[in-house]
């Protein structure tokens, strides 16, 4: 009680400083777990060559990682919320850091695909713990700038591996992928464990209250997870998330293979760097930049119009890469555009979810929506099936382009009116309760 009173009495400048410090800590944590997903593609070929493992078998480990990284986040988010703003975030993230380190260390010793899958499962649990808490903290601390704050947090995850693409490739070449897994896992997980103890959620009265406008409408009540799951709005958001996430994860997991099949992977492009190296750096930067950029845009023009702009551009980008991507510079440009127009789902969807269902249960609710990423990962291997069936990547990129255009239509013509009706119904209910009806 004393803490709550103290927080309520805190000066606006102090509260503002606190929340920006918390946001920065969350971003750093996200940077440190980014390689779990975005650096994976660099390890696939070396593992396949050393052990004669089938690439499809190796990519099952990627699917396991994504599945556990997403599907367990509601539990991890619930634990963080349940333990309270002081204990929950720091404890869950610190334990997540330990799992991150252990997962990649197991990968470094894996002599069988089964052991590789175990490592993927452990790192997935750790990555999800860190991700759920950092995003949950952002939406709670920044009700007034929710799109921007979540975008910056998610940018750490999307762009973080850009800093380590060259070191990863160099260490894999010089010391082998096993040592790379071991040392990067140990360092990244260890730092997350240490700085995770600095995280906390906002105390009552410490964070700005929700603000609504004609363009960004925020719920006047908070939905419990069970209430949210009973609404058609949530399941529409889930479907849209799955469609966009599946196309983006396909690009994330397969980009090195696409470059190899196009015959341009090792083509020297810039200052001695190969096409693949340049593409990976550009992709990660664009993926990261997209998240705060489109989050900031959505704070001003609304969530659904921003989705239409981003996902419409994504549809065009997939078509261009499938049609013109065999040129090295075109490959870098169009792949970068793909990453720029899909990474923002990790700012737009959590923001939309919290706008719609309120902040009180935000860590759990956004985590439940985030499980759509885990569902979508099982669509990723279908890209390899379609590619093998048609003999090229063109059909794969056409399908992903169509999926993006479908989501644009859903955002503008289904989600937007559905959210408006739910908000109107909620406001009417709140007014009736206040009037004593």
Image (tube, helix red, strand yellow):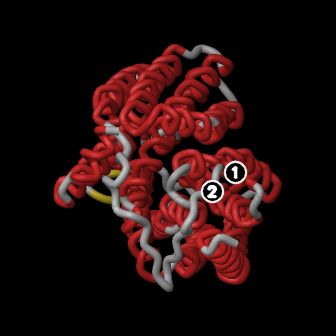
Q: Residue at x 73, y 54 (%)?
A: 229
Q: Residue at x 18, y 57 (%)?
A: 11
Residue 211 position, x and y percent, is 42, 72
Q: Residues within 10 Å of mark 1 (few under 14, many from 20)?
A: many
Work out whether 428 lies above or below 183: below
Task: Give the mark toward the camera: 2 or 1.
Answer: 2
Instruction: Looking at this view, name the residue that lies furthest to the front.
Output: 436
- Quarter containing the C terminus: bottom right
The foreground one among 195 and 9 is 9
Work out whether 278 lies above or below 129: below
Q: Residue at x 36, y 47 (%)?
A: 202
Q: Residue at x 57, y 37 (%)?
A: 78
Instruction: Looking at this view, name the residue that lies furthest to the right.
Output: 389
The foreground one among 84 and 253 is 84
CA gap between label 2 and label 1 equals 25 Å
- The answer to whether residue 200 shows anywhere in this view is yes
Q: Earlier in the sequence, mark 2 or mark 1?
A: 2
Residue 355 position, x and y percent, is 53, 66
- Is label 1 in a helix, a strand or a loop? helix
- Quarter containing the N terminus: top left
Q: What residue does disc 2 label?
A: 223
């Amino acid at each position: 009680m004393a803490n709550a009173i103290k927080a309520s009495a805190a000066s606006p400048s102090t509260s503002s400083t606190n929340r920006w410090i918390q946001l920065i800590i969350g971003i750093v944590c996200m940077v440190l777990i980014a390689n779990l997903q975005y650096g994976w593609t660099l390890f696939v070929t070396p593992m396949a060559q050393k052990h004669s493992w089938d690439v499809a078998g190796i990519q099952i480990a990627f699917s396991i990682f994504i599945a556990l990284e997403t599907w367990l986040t509601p539990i991890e988010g619930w634990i963080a919320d349940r333990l309270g703003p002081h204990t929950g975030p720091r404890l869950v993230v610190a334990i997540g850091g330990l799992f991150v380190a252990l997962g990649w260390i197991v990968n470094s010793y894996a002599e069988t695909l089964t052991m590789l899958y175990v490592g993927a499962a452990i790192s997935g649990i750790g990555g999800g713990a860190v991700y759920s808490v950092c995003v949950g903290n952002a939406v709670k601390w920044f009700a007034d700038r929710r799109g921007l704050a979540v975008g910056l947090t998610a940018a750490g995850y999307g762009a973080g591996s850009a800093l380590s693409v060259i070191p990863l490739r160099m260490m894999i070449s010089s010391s082998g992928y096993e040592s790379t897994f071991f040392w990067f896992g140990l360092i990244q997980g260890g730092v997350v464990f240490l700085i995770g103890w600095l995280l906390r959620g906002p105390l009552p009265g410490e964070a700005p209250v929700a603000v609504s406008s004609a363009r960004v409408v925020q719920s006047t009540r908070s939905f419990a997870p069970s209430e949210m799951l009973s609404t058609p709005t949530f399941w529409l958001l889930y479907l849209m998330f799955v469609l966009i996430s599946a196309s983006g994860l396909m690009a994330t997991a397969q980009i090195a293979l696409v470059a190899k099949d196009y015959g341009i992977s090792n083509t020297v492009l810039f200052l001695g760097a190969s096409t693949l190296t340049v593409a990976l750096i550009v992709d990660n930067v664009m993926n990261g930049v997209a998240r705060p950029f489109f989050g900031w845009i959505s704070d001003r023009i609304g969530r659904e119009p921003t989705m239409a702009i981003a996902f419409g551009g994504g549809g065009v980008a997939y078509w261009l890469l499938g049609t013109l991507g065999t040129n090295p510079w075109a490959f870098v440009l169009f792949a970068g555009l793909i990453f720029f127009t899909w990474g923002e789902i990790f700012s737009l969807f959590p923001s939309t979810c919290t706008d719609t269902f309120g902040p009180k249960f935000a860590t759990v609710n956004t985590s439940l929506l985030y499980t759509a990423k885990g569902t979508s990962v099982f669509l990723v291997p279908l890209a390899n099936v379609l590619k093998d069936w048609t003999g090229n990547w063109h059909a794969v990129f056409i399908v992903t382009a169509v999926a993006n255009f479908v989501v644009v239509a859903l955002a503008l013509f289904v989600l937007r009116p559905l959210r408006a009706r739910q908000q109107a119904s909620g406001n009417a209910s709140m007014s009736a309760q206040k009037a004593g009806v």
